[in-house]
Amino acid sequence: MTIGYDLVLEEIPERSRVLDLGCGDGSLLVLLQEQKKVKGYGVEISEEGVGLCVEKGLYCYQADIDEGLCDYKNDSFDYVILNQTIQNTKRPDSVINEVLRIGRKSIVSFPNFAYISTRSYLMFRGSMPVNELLPYEWYESPNIHLLTISDMRKMAEKFFFNIIGEKNFSLSKNGRSRIVKFFPNLLAQYGFFILEKK
Amino acid sequence: MTENNNTGIVETHYFTFGEPPDELLLLHGERLGPVTVAYETYGILNEKKNNAILINHALSGSAHAAGYYSASDKNPGWWDVYIGPGKAFDTEKYYIICSNIIGGCSGSTGPASINPQTGMHYGTDFPQVTISDMVNVQYYLIKHLGIEKLLAVAGGSMGGMQALQWTISYPEMVNSCIAIATAASLSAQGIAFNEVGRQAIFNDPNWSRGVYYDGEFPRAGLSLARMIGHITYLSEKHMHEKFGRNFQSPALDVNDLSSEYMVESYLRHQGIKFVERFDANSYIYITRAIDHFDLKKDFGGDLVAAFENVEANFLVISFTSDWLYPSDRSRDIVRALRVNGKNVNYTDIATDNGHDSFLLPNDITEKYISNFLKNEFRKSIKQAE
């Protein structure tokens, strides 16, 4: 099970129409199809990823999320998933706006930059954190827009969406997600938000 | 690929329909009959008749998509790299059909055929056919073969245009569509190159307004048209890598009119080879059909509307270095399908081989086609249960 899949599976109702942005090899979509009978679609930037999706019998197209959403009609999907993807986009603000235009709800999950070990790494070492959540040197990282759980909450005040649920979590040793309710901005490894447009 | 992945010895079959008074009605209202279709099949049609795939050829193709005509034949069919046992279009699983288009010159009725009304070759009296007419003719062939629904229609370039047209003309008959290096309409640049090719033929004195079948053929014009075509099929990079600035014969490395670069020799060879097997009038008719193809215009200027009623699932493939049918034209198709909520896979394969890529061996293309078909076949069986 890969990061946060169990929480996404829990959240999405049966037979929803789902778009997974940055779907990678399509393994989350396969689980959603098998367990929730969703009608799922993927968008993926790499040819390798699209190829693996086609191999699994999914429908996926190769595109950059920053550019590839404008053609969809409003409310084309019940859920649009941004699982560990939003921090890779060039303009997270326009992506979020587009996502909430084409989907009724969105699940946004990302590595929480304010997590205690990331924070202390920066505090004590004075250099960009490289750890299990953010395994890249700054110069090679795809994470070009790092954010915290607080940042997401602040975004909701400025943008036209409501946060209708939060399931911020850390990973247990067995790979399952453990929801963190106590000081999540400090103690949760990952933010997990369910958004709905205002 | 399996070790023995040859389709083996194949033969061309002929199907004739549209005998007067039941001629084929063409898109522009003219009637044509009788119509003969040359076709080949590979693999076995299963009992449920749900494993049939129609392959559509491009401008210079024919019904001979795979296999050889005899044990000594050295030239396999035009898509033999992708059709055969264990290949992308696996003849051990699927029943593959490929037919020569109407207007062509490789066995199907075209300008070189005899007009039964005059007893002479049609020449330029042949009616202007469209991509949609080509598809309608294939429809009669498919019905004749007793197939109600195709597992897939597939093709590259103009073959891709036919595949797209199939999903629009006969939505209920197409389970899936593989459209490679194609477009919903040709660009102005593409039309321009087609026109230069046609002018080369028109300006050959032997063309004689299309009436040449009993005399000298317009060989110079047709071979020049083919040479121009070949330039558009390659990318700048691929061409330079393949030929560089090398001379055909290093001894003739002189800077006068007689010097011959390898690239010139290659193009000339392609031109000469082509004249042996292709009819100049067919070249004119087919390039015109490509020029006229415009799904957007057919649907009041709205490409989204064109795909509104399609039922097929799609695999769209483009190649990064294809400038004749650029990737963006494939994305237009994908976008229109997506807006309609259709099932579509799309990938832009990185290669230097230009438009020709769809005809050349490519592991990624192979993998996409084979996986897509495998899943579409599985899903179509599940759906039927």
Image (spheres, helix red, strand yellow):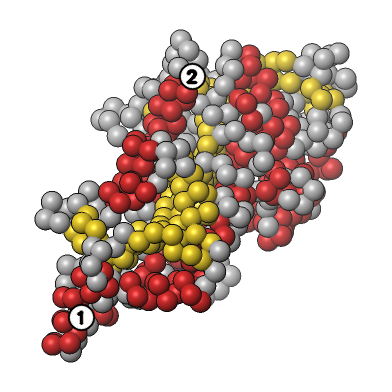
Choose between B118 and A187: the one closer to the eye: A187
For mark 1, does the 10 Å Cα neighbourhood hold few (<14), some (14 to 19), or many (20 or more) residues? Answer: some
Q: Is residue A191 toward the left or the right of residue B81 in the image?
A: left
Choose between B331 and B201: the one closer to the eye: B331
Quadrant of the image for the N terminus of chain B? top left
Residue tagged 1: A119
Residue tagged 2: B384
CB atoms at circles 1 and 2 under 8 Å apart? no
Choose between B206 and B122: the one closer to the eye: B122
| Residue A113, percent from left and from top | 27, 75
Can residue B248 be seen here?
no
Picture quarter containing residue B207? top right
| Residue B103, percent from left and from top | 72, 33
Can residue B36 be seen here?
yes
Question: Which amino acid type corresponds to the residue marked 2 in the rendered image?
Answer: Ala
Task: Name the residue located 68 percent from the left edge and 20 percent from the top edge.
Answer: B140
Q: Is residue B72 above or below residue A48?
A: above
Compute the Cα span from label 1 to label 2. 56 Å
